[in-house]
Amino acid sequence: MTRPLTLGYSTCPNDTFLFHALAHGMVDCRGLEFDIRLADVEQLNQDAESGVLDVTKLSFAAIGQLQERYALLRSGAALGRGCGPLVVARPGFDASRLGRTRVAVPGMRTTAAMLLGLYLSKAPACAAMIFDRIMPAVARGDFDAGVIIHEGRFTYQEHGLSSLVDLGRWWEEETGLPIPLGGIAVRRDLGPDIARRVEAAIRDSVAYAFQHPEASADYVRAHAQEMAADVVRQHIALYVNDFTLELGASGVAAVVELFRRGHMAGLLSLSRRALLAVDDSGAPGEK
């Protein structure tokens, strides 16, 4: 590769934690260089639509919409159990009204918005905003309800809000599978060799993070804004796990099921492209 690869990931603690070693030259990048771009995940979703990012963190819902251009890597994903988005509202709101009111979501391309649609069995009436503005907006009464992600799971009660629906728990009860939130995607036109090398470098960066959990502390803190230290720790513990190192069979099955349900509900177009950039045997996926 004669130029640096553009690599996008979010400023959230789980991403800065797992990418710290790669960003700071602490792992073997297999002869690759990276031009790192940090942004809110919905901004990354939007940027990927025009293909400006070679490798990027994306909401799984966005990956489902962009399968003609991007393929999924097995390392770096946010996926697990007990970690899905929550639908929150002010106390006393009737959850049966969710399908009849506008709901604030952290972006129209996010898995959170897609899960709300699957839960309601129809495309919801949504208003998109940056994820950390949703709880204040609902608390002010700008919206009756909002779908929150990331550290909002730990802080919504501080805004005087109540949890109406745990969309992750609903998904797990419906499917028996972990909830797929976001993954790392690579442009298909970069070819199988680049995809394999990028995946290996990310896997090594995740492994380094597990082995040296304090090494990234300054990097994580620098991008965590005013997030409390205990919330940062909870955030990382919840969203960085064995699935982040390697999706595995159940992780892949969860993504496939999300896309299948999204297609059946009319929320995603059907794609016949291979999901994975590199298949189970280590060979490249369909290009």
Image (cartoon, rainbow, N blue to C red):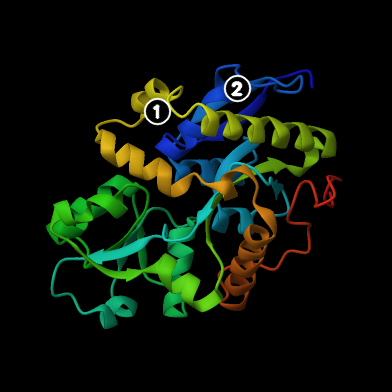
Q: Residue at x 59, y 24 (%)?
A: 22
**Residue 285 in the image: x percent, y percent?**
82, 50
Residue 220's tag is 1
Q: Residue furthest bottom?
A: 96
For numbered disc 2, what is the local secondary structure? Answer: strand
Task: Report how many numbered discs are placed on residues in the image.
Answer: 2
Q: Nearer the viewer, residue 267 or 228?
A: 228
Q: Could you classify mark 1 by the number of other residues whose Cα lies within 10 Å: few (under 14), some (14-19), or many (20 or more)?
A: many
**Residue 236 in the image: x percent, y percent?**
41, 41
Q: Quadrant of residue 180?
A: bottom right
Side of 10 where 91 appears, left or right: left
Q: Nearer the viewer, residue 111 or 233?
A: 233
**Residue 258 in the image: x percent, y percent?**
59, 67
Compared to residue 134, the image places residue 187 above or below, namely above
Hey, what amino acid is under mark 2? Asp
Q: Residue at x 34, y 48 (%)?
A: 131
Side of 32 where 211 appears, left or right: left
Compared to residue 28, the image places residue 116 above or below, namely below
Q: Residue at x 71, y 37 (%)?
A: 199
Side of 168 where 197 appears, left or right: right
Q: Label 2, on which residue?
A: 35
The Cα–Cα distance between marks 2 and 1, rounded to whole angstroms, is 18 Å
**Which quadrant of the figure contains the N terminus?**
top right
Asked whether residue 227 appears in the rendered view, the answer is: no
**Residue 183 in the image: x percent, y percent?**
58, 48
For numbered disc 1, what is the local secondary structure? Answer: helix
Hey, what amino acid is under mark 1? Val
Which mark lies nearer to you, 2 or 1?
1
Compared to residue 130, the image places residue 255 above or below, namely below
Q: Earlier in the sequence, mark 2 or mark 1?
A: 2
